[in-house]
Amino acid sequence: MKRKNLFQFEFLLLFVLGLEILIFSKTGTNFATQRNMLEVLRQSTEIGLLAVVMTPIILTGGIDLSVGSMLGLSAVLFGKMWRDMGMSPALAALTTLLLGAAGGGLNALLITRLKLPPLIVTLGSFSLFRGLAEALTRGVDNFTNFPQRFLFLGQGYLLNVVPAQLPLFGLITLAVWLLVHKTTFGRSFRAIGFSPEGAHYAGIPVGKRLTLAYTLSGIISALAALIYVARVGQAKADAGTGYELLAITAVVLGGASIFGGTGTVHGTLLGVFVLAVLKIGLTLSDQPSELAGILTGGLLLVVLAGEALAKRISAGRIHANPKPCVPRTAET
Amino acid sequence: MRSKNRRNMISNRSLLCFASPLFFLLALSCNKPEQTSAKASPSGKQIILAMMPKSKGNAYFISCKKGADAAAKELGVKLLWDGPTDPDPARQNEIVETWITRGVDVIAVAVENREGISTALRKARAKGIKVITWDSDALPDARDFLINQATPEGIGFTLMDEAARTLGGKGEFAIITASLTAANMNEWQKYIEQRRAEKYPDIKMAALRPCDDMKDKAFAESTAILNSNPDVKLLMAICSPAVPGASEAVKQSGRKDVKVVGLGLPNDNKRYVREDITPSVILWNTENLGYLSVHAAVAVAKGELKPGATSFKAGRLGELEIKGDNVLLGKPFVFNKENIEQFNF
């Protein structure tokens, strides 16, 4: 029985992360330094935020493809409100967060009221948000020269060591972790993922829970946009292109089932780190960056295959007759 | 057995909750002394040059890399060539930031977005890494030099010289431009006219038509010019889609006495160059651009090329002029029947 613990999915991931760190410490220049580890965290912040709030959505069996586009739209809106409408950065940031919530709310409304599949709804808003961002800037306008105090959010270092965005990232991750793992909300997300009807008959307000998850995703996408703008120092309509897929990759790598019901926030976080370490480690080892794409895909498939195999083996230990590969949804 | 399983899993989960933040702790505890190759370079250590194109997949930049590789081999430096696969300003920033961590001696960037990359480049300079830009510039305070592949003067003069050579020193020509308001086009026209007035008084410009940067419109405008101005013996296309557009118009008109010269990419124009409709296409030599960028970057890293210099000797390219903080690649390159097949971009 004890051996089964080794197959706990997150341990496999932790092992992969450890292996990556070990390898890149040997091959990379200045990889195993405090500054680089903090740089890994700094560069993971935007994708990390998107992945962390994607986790409850995937737990409910849904998906949000619009987060990257929401990031782009929020970046452009923030730039427009600050430069063209004369708002202070703080006010513009606050309004951006509210608009992010509205965007997420729109997704939630269509999903809960019209009972449309999340994949289709967010595929629509994926195009809609990006399209709006491009229309607002005619595809060429680029907001720059933000005040130094705002840029500090993405470029500054607290006490000259800790990147300024990290405390925010940590705080939000902790909040979502508590929400998912320590409150009844978390349990209801999983219940919805297993069976929306069952959850409904069990007295869970399915619509409200889904609205919470998608609205949260909208707000945090807007927050990620602010951090992105502060880090890169510019807001353009193409900001965050493809981030939704990276976020989903991190969540799935982190052990969540795409069918809903299983998954953890700390698993997602590990997934984010595995991807970020891979990307930075390759560059520090003087390898071309396109290798990261190949290895990310390969790693995802290997880890998932490893997990499925481990499950089969452990299932074989418990039951006399090994059953054919059980999809992850079927287990708690 | 079930309940025992469950308990195990719960304890596992709480264990993991501690494991995840472990990464943060690891981040703070790792404190291996960092290598700073930046300081060591003058004392004979191999120089590490990190060079970034706008996008790696673009044939234009692949051709630049050929020259860069040659120069790196010649100078015995380590060349790291990396960049986004598609033009992506945020990815350019990330790679530069990672190069800062890695500790390279000099960074050379073909900039996709001026303001965006400048923050990262300033950070590199603050860490003692030398920075130059090539092909396209960042903000002036974010780099020491720009390797400038072509000046408006060079482009204007070369276009007019090629036109005059093709016309045999006299006759009429027409210009197809992108738009009548584009700043760079107007700048080129100014130098074309200056050269014509100074050196070729027997040549006359008969028409100037915009093509809105579209090949179709360039084709239509060229056809119209050929019909309305029968004395025009040469079309000068000064935006890249206009060159094949004008050439196609000449080809379909069947007129053997009209030629095209223009500013464009070799691949767009190869067939017309072969058929002798377009005797010369003007651009810069991309291999030389990569070659010069590496030479200049290395010289900056060694402290041999300092702000304020007025000339620079770059290997096989010889002595090149420096105007302000721009290292000039020199006169544009003329692609013609003899050499165009060697280029693929």
Image (cartoon, coloured by chain):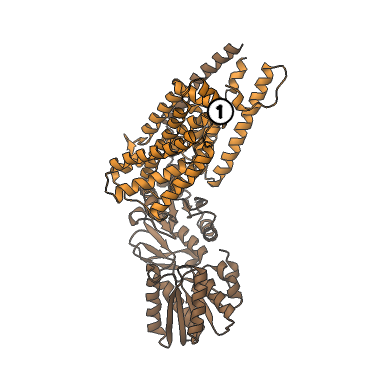
Chain colours: A orange, B brown
Assign a secondary structure to mark 1.
helix
Residue type (three-letter) at the residue carrying disc 1: Phe
User: Left or right: where does residue B143 sit relative to residue A279?
Assistant: left
Q: Residue at position x 35%, y 51% from top?
A: A143
Q: Is residue B151 above or below residue B119?
A: below
Point out the image quarter for the C terminus of chain B. Answer: bottom right
- Expressed as whole percent of the image width and height from the top left, the position of residue B99 reads 45, 45
The local crowd at label 1, few if under 14, some if 14 to 19, many if 20 or more residues have their Cα within 10 Å, is few
- Expressed as whole percent of the image width and height from the top left, the position of residue B109 reads 44, 54
Q: Give the residue at the far front of this rendering.
A: A114
User: Left or right: where does residue A152 sit relative to residue B233?
Assistant: left
The residue beneath circle 1 is A15
Camera-nearest residue between B56 and A84: A84
Camera-nearest residue between B182 and B51: B182
Q: Is residue A237 above or below residue A6?
A: below
Point out the image quarter for the N terminus of chain B. Answer: top right
